[in-house]
Amino acid sequence: MADSIHTVRWIKQISNQGWEIHLFPSIDTGWVHSEFQSVEVHHSFYADRVKSESSIRQRGFYVPSHLLASKGREILARRNTDYRARQLANLVRKVKPNMVHSLEIQAAGYLTLAAKKMSVGKFPPWLLTNWGSDICLFGRLSGHKAKIKEVLAGCDFYSCECVRDADLARVYGFNGTIMPVLPNAGGFDLDQVDSFRTALPTSARRAVMLKGYQGWAGRALFGLRALARCADALQGYEVFIYSAGQDVQLAAELFTSETHVPTYIVPIGTPHGEILKLHGMARISIGLSISDAISTSLIEAMVMGSFPIQSWTGCANEWISDGKNGILVPPEDPDVIEKAIRTALNDDGLVDGAAEMNFGIAKERLDQSKIRPEVLRMYETICFCGGPP
């Protein structure tokens, strides 16, 4: 997904190695995230030109407006529903890459499988990466289960950020090589993020962060309801909500009206550093969803010393000892979530001890200087073992 900060952060790890990196957007929107560097992006139709000194190179049909680009993509899809898979198959034939890496399954994985079926001759070694709920949730849905099994049968290597998902890949029939379990968002420059953290101990902070996703997986409204029940304990606090849609923004306005607890909506597109700073000001960071993998917001909270309250439906249990360095909760039970929030608001020793414990985990498992060499070795291993196509 070329507009995703997660894609940006992953590719930054493999930049500046003298490797030729081609990005084929699995969702054909014509957009490219502004933080990309040293990558060639392959659109169908696109409208935005990059600056001449940029290290991003865009390929496809350039048109002078987003409306025309959208119409171009619409015509392509109407004439040939699998036009994007054909474009990918043609690109693989032309470039002859040492490997193909699908970041995510339901868009990128399905697309790569379709392109492989269209390809003539040997397909390059294929690495498939599980994002979020790709297997854990979608693998239980009738419309996806068989397709996921087919993708896993078609790829050669598999990576994920949870031991849970490595085990699930085997359950769904994957017989290839499972790569080291690493965070999909890469690591953190711990010296840099340390400068984002307030000098106050966690117990002295007076802010709460709430992940604002509400939809097919996110359950932010349950978090907001639980916070409303804690209004008496939240006097003197501020609530910051990020990644919030209109429904959550509306509920937040009502929350403030009823509780008199100030609430701030963090604008969509706020730089990653600013999000980290807000976690670094927060006593508590809350993230709720019916399914996820690590959840990037969880490890951001851990790195920044904010006490995590996280739904147990992801694999947070691979990072959190419940009741010690965070609290795991059901995503749709405001009673349990309220109890967790009150515990975190009232127990200074708990949140300060958790911050110390989590920073130790971050130095061991989230340090960019440790993760990046692992990622580079992963690519080198695949290219060496698979050989040229």
Image (spheres, rainbow, N blue to C red):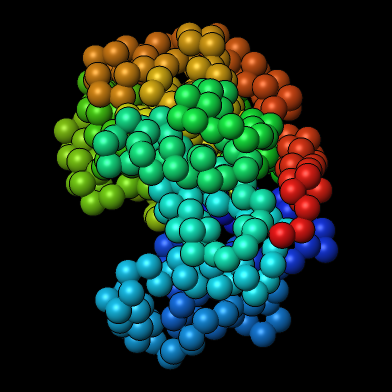
- Given residues 371 and 263, the one toward you in this image is 371
Residue found at x 74% / y 42% = 378
Q: x, y percentage for residue 218?
A: 32, 37
Residue found at x 71% / y 81% = 53
- Given residues 269 and 156, the one toward you in this image is 156
Q: Is residue 212 left or right of residue 275?
A: left
Q: x, y percentage for residue 106?
A: 41, 48
Residue found at x 38% / y 23% = 313
Residue 227 visible at all: no
Question: Which quarter of the figure is the C terminus placed in?
Answer: bottom right
- Given residues 135 and 336, the one toward you in this image is 135
Residue 148 sits above or below residue 273 on the image: above
Residue 302 visible at all: yes
Residue 335 sits above or below residue 223 on the image: above
Residue found at x 25% / y 28% = 222
Q: x, y percentage for residue 263?
A: 32, 40
Q: Locate residue 217: give its quadrant.
A: top left
* Residue lying farthest to the bottom in this orientation: 64
Residue 77 sits above or below residue 284 on the image: below
Q: Locate residue 210: give its quadrant.
A: top left
Q: Is residue 168 left or right of residue 124?
A: left
Q: x, y percentage for residue 137?
A: 36, 32
